[in-house]
Amino acid sequence: MSDVANVSPAIAAKRGADEIPWNKHTRPKKSPGDHAVDAVIWLLVAAVVAVVVYPLWFIIVASFSDQTLVSAGQVTIWPKGFTLAGYLRVFQDSRIWTGYGNTILYTLLGTALNLVVTLPAAFALARIEFKPRRVILFLFTFTMYFAGGLVPNYLLFKALGLLDNWLVFIIPGAVSVWNLIIARSFFETSIPEELHDAAQIDGLGYFGYFLKVVLPLSSAIIAVIGLYYFVGHWNDYFTGLIYIRESSLQPLQNVLRDILLANQTNQLGSGSGGQNVLQQQQIADQIKYGVIIVSTLPLLVIYPFLQKYFNKGVMIGAVKG
């Protein structure tokens, strides 16, 4: 008698069930408790999304609304008393176009330099055969905890000729140690060493391996740290505040700050009439909301195109066997 005949019906039934390929039609039905848990999870997710999204939506709505209605609490979901006064006052200042151009230039060049410096350095520090890597990484990490301070940095930049120089936005922050460590960890854990062995067999050196193999497989980490660098450069106002006096070199954030402070100053010196003060306050609020939208809109447009890389598994299928 064969072995199949000696198998009990229960075991045979179990083996038959295990051999059935899984699909969405064979998965077990959810119990009422499972549906209740799913409902709670969806409610929590919806609540978190509402908490995060609504403040931004309110700023957008308020920037297009009559500030009298906003102050009275009548503006919640949709604009009321539609107006573009805040945006018109912001864009009437010619400095804003200069600030936009400066910020775009500083952001693009700065981010490009950051990636050019960070990625090769992280790749070198990820190679086991590079003996000084631990010492060099320690020196990089040391700068995260100990810095010279504002006055020594100012004197250093003055000696280097970086005061009132647009290069002060780009060169001093050429590398972020935090992003360097993230990229190094990615190269160590997500790029299999078998790819390097195969590249060596094909006659590629480290430079060719990095350009032709590592970089194409690192789109996720490039997008992530690129976005971090981009946001950092775009929101940088401290550099322009401390090291730049020339108005033609000021970035957008400093220009918007000057516009907002100028309108607040006009409000304080506008006389004692209550109605006049109220009108000045409303104008200042319109400009405030408009400034927030103008300064954050480019980031809101760019982010959805890079979000997919955050959780994308770019290494699936890179190594077989």
Image (cartoon, rainbow, N blue to C red):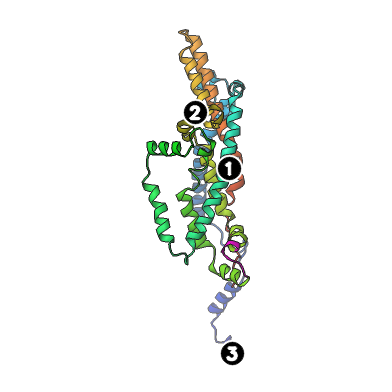
How many numbered marks, from 0 up? 3
Going by the numbered disc 1, the residue's amino acid type is Leu
Dot label at residue 2? 3
Q: Which residue is mark 2?
A: 245
State the image coordinates of residue 113 (x, y, percent, origin top left).
55, 47
Q: Which residues are magenta?
A: 203-208
N-terminal of the pair, mark 3 or mark 1, is 3
Residue at image point 47% right, 48% down: 176
Q: Is residue 25 above or below residue 233?
A: below
Residue under label 1: 109
The reply to whether the magenta stretch includes residue 256 is: no
Q: Name the secondary structure under disc 3.
A: loop
Which picture quadrant has residue 102?
top right
Residue name at image x 50 percent, y 60 percent:
124
* Quadrant containing the C terminus in the rendered view: bottom right
Nearer to us of marks 3 and 1 is 1
Q: Is residue 311 visible?
A: no
Up the image or down, 20 lies above or below 265; here it is below
Instruction: Looking at the picture, tell me which residue is in the foreground, 67 or 314.
Output: 314
Q: Spatial distance from mark 3 to mark 2, Cα to Cα? A: 93 Å
